[in-house]
Image (spheres, rainbow, N blue to C red):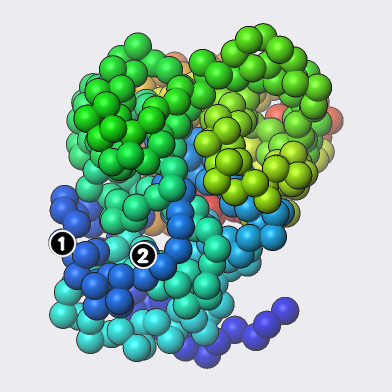
Amino acid sequence: MPLHHPDYAATLNYLYEQLPMFQRVGGAAFKKDLTNIRSLLEALGNPQDSWPCIHVAGTNGKGTVSHLLSSIFQAAGFKTGLYTSPHYRDFRERIKIDGKLLSEASVVAFVANHRKLIEDIRPSFFEITVAMAFDAFAREGVDMAIIETGLGGRLDSTNIVHPVLSVITNISFDHQEFLGDTLPAIAGEKAGIIKAHVPVVIGKTQPETQGVFAEKANKMEAPVFFADRQYRAERLHWNETHTFFNVFDNKAHLRHIHLALNAHGPFQAENLVTVLAALDVLKPLYPAIVPHWIRALREMKQLSNYIGRWQLLQQHPRVIADSAHNEGGLKLVMEELQRLPYRHLHLVIGVVKDKSPDKVLALLPKDASYYFTRASIPRAMPEETLRERAAAFGLKGKVYPDVKQALNAAVETAHPEEDLVFVGGSTFVVADII
């Protein structure tokens, strides 16, 4: 294992303390234009123009779809950059090349070499992270980059790229204060990544949003493909590490393959269909991926260093963590939990204080035991406040000052063979224990 760079911790402290970071402070870090990122990238020589990319947006599933696409190109021998957010344990999870985290030395050197630029422009934490990723991909000479949006699309700092393909997974309610309080309004922001003449794959056909995407694609003369009109994935069976599917095309022809995804949570059928539709666009452009894509899906976790989604933390009792944190995401997670065998369910739950938790709380089962907690970020809702809000929905439990204490209490209380412990409600809750 490589030694830690002596200046890495100080460099991160500088970024965290000097730049507004949405992960920690919320809306104060959100920039409603692309001025800063344009200035940063121009000063860096516009590195985003030196590699082809796929741009991925959506409310849920965009991180998984990004990792799947990255794995496909990696398996085919392409040097592949992957930019995602937020991170769980290490800042460098945001910037990977061939599944490996950017080196600590690269982070330190970028900040040291561009400190004056940073202090002149005063970007947000997310903006400087995007610039760092794009610069690293150019310096390392990637053959393909997979770029996940952070928040929204139209005004997201990543929306400076000109991709070979745009992907929008689905639309649900999240970040309404920035993106709008209706599904069509949110879809309009996500549709902002659609570029002139660039194909776009929409993962899920939704009555409220399909017209928004069709109209924007038509305006941009961009071919548009609705993935769930082309494919249907039928889950056959699953175990703790893989899920197996039969896949049908839009003519109901069975594709005689079973796909095993190394992270089998509730979105995977939808994510798989989205990736298959994306492959239909990508295969003619990059035929070298054709012999490798099935293996890539099976080995996604190892190839792309994928964590935090439907992650099995231990057995006896079984503990599963998932970072779904909005209404659409938690609804599917709860449906998936109901399919699993257990005598009693224990939920370790925390949320952020700058978003109303009511729609999420309304989805949670009343007959579970709750361990209300807070993640180790300033945005976290105090555990007592969360318990009070949850009581209005008939949810009862105890409070714990940090996630590890809450999880330990749940594990000690749960029957080791018959009960199930789930940890979630926020990306940051999951980050504290994986």
Return the residue nearer the eye: 191 or 380: 191
Under mark 1, the amino acid is Thr
Task: Residue 242: give x, y in percent of width and height.
Answer: 77, 35
Dot label at residue 35? 1
Dot label at residue 234? none
User: Label 2 belongs to which residue?
Assistant: 49
Q: Is residue 251 above or below residue 323?
A: above
Mark 2 packing: few (<14 Cα in 10 Å), some, or many (20+)?
A: some
Q: Is residue 121 visible?
A: yes
Report the mark closest to the observer, 1 or 2. 2
Q: Quadrant of the N terminus?
A: bottom right
* Separation of residues labelled 1 and 2 (CA atoms): 17 Å
- First of labels 1, 2 by sequence position: 1
Q: Name the element at disc 1.
A: helix
Under mark 2, the amino acid is Asp
Task: Residue 18: give x, y in percent of width and height.
Answer: 26, 74
Q: Is residue 361 above or below residue 77?
A: above
Q: How many marks?
A: 2
Side (left or right) of 300 relative to 181: right
Check contact, mark 1 vs mark 2: CB within 8 A.
no
Q: Is residue 164 above or below residue 35?
A: above
Image point 16% across, 50% down: which residue? Answer: 32
Q: Is residue 175 visible?
A: no
Image point 22% across, 53% down: which residue? Answer: 30
Return the residue nearer the eye: 30 or 113: 113
Mark 1 packing: few (<14 Cα in 10 Å), some, or many (20+)?
A: few
Q: Name the element at disc 2.
A: helix
Return the residue nearer the eye: 247 or 8: 247
Side (left or right) of 359 relative to 82: left
Image point 40% across, 34% down: which residue? Answer: 200
Task: Residue 122: give x, y in percent of width and height.
Answer: 18, 72
Image point 36% across, 70% down: which residue? Answer: 47
